[in-house]
Image (tube, rainbow, N blue to C red):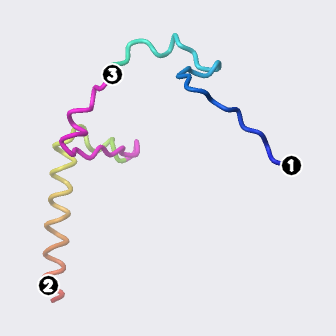
Amino acid sequence: MKKTTERRGGKDELRREYDLSKLKGGTRGKYVARYRAGTNLVLLSPDVAEYFPDEQSVNTALRALIHVAKDSLARLR
């Protein structure tokens, strides 16, 4: 037997189980400018994040890795 799904009209309501007291303090559109600029947001695993205190250190490490990888590929050719 097929399960029936609840039909939603044109209502824009939160579900009953959402606790509205936890929704306070948020900023709407906080990252919209970055998103429109094409910024890639990446979530680092906690063990990796220990070694990278800020975005500059991540970028420096990735640039070094790219440089090493390019040199390795150039030697193989």
Residue 30 placement, left or right of 26 = left
How far is disc 3 from disc 2 in space, using C-alphas? 50 Å
**Which residue is depicted at the point 19% across and 54% down?**
61
Among all residues in the image, which is located at the extreme front? 10
How far is disc 1 from disc 2 in space, using C-alphas? 63 Å
Residue 66, image x, y percentages: 18, 65
Helix or strand or loop: what does disc 1 sit on? loop
Which is more toward the observer, 29 or 63?
Answer: 29
Q: Give the range drawn in magenta.
A: 29-47
* Residue ID for mark 2: 75
**Which residue is depicted at the point 13% across and 75% down?**
71
| Position of 24 relative to 32 (above/below) | above
Residue 30 placement, left or right of 25 = left
* Residue ID for mark 1: 1
Quadrant into which the C terminus falls: bottom left
Q: Which mark is residue 26?
A: none
Sooner in the amino-acid sequence: mark 1 or mark 3: 1
Q: What residue type is labelled 3?
A: Arg
| Position of 11 relative to 36 (above/below) | above
Sooner in the amino-acid sequence: mark 1 or mark 2: 1
Q: What residue type is labelled 2?
A: Arg
Q: Which amino acid does label 1 sit on?
A: Met
Q: How crowded is mark 3: few (under 14 residues within 10 Å), some or many (20 or more)?
A: few
Among all residues in the image, which is located at the extreme bottom? 77
Q: Residues within 10 Å of mark 2 (few under 14, many from 20)?
A: few
Helix or strand or loop: what does disc 2 sit on? helix
Among all residues in the image, which is located at the extreme right? 1
Q: In which quarter of the image is residue 63?
A: bottom left
Residue 36, image x, y percentages: 22, 40
**Which residue is depicted at the point 15% across and 60% down?**
64
Q: Residues within 10 Å of mark 1 (few under 14, many from 20)?
A: few
Quick check: is 20 in the magenta stretch? Answer: no
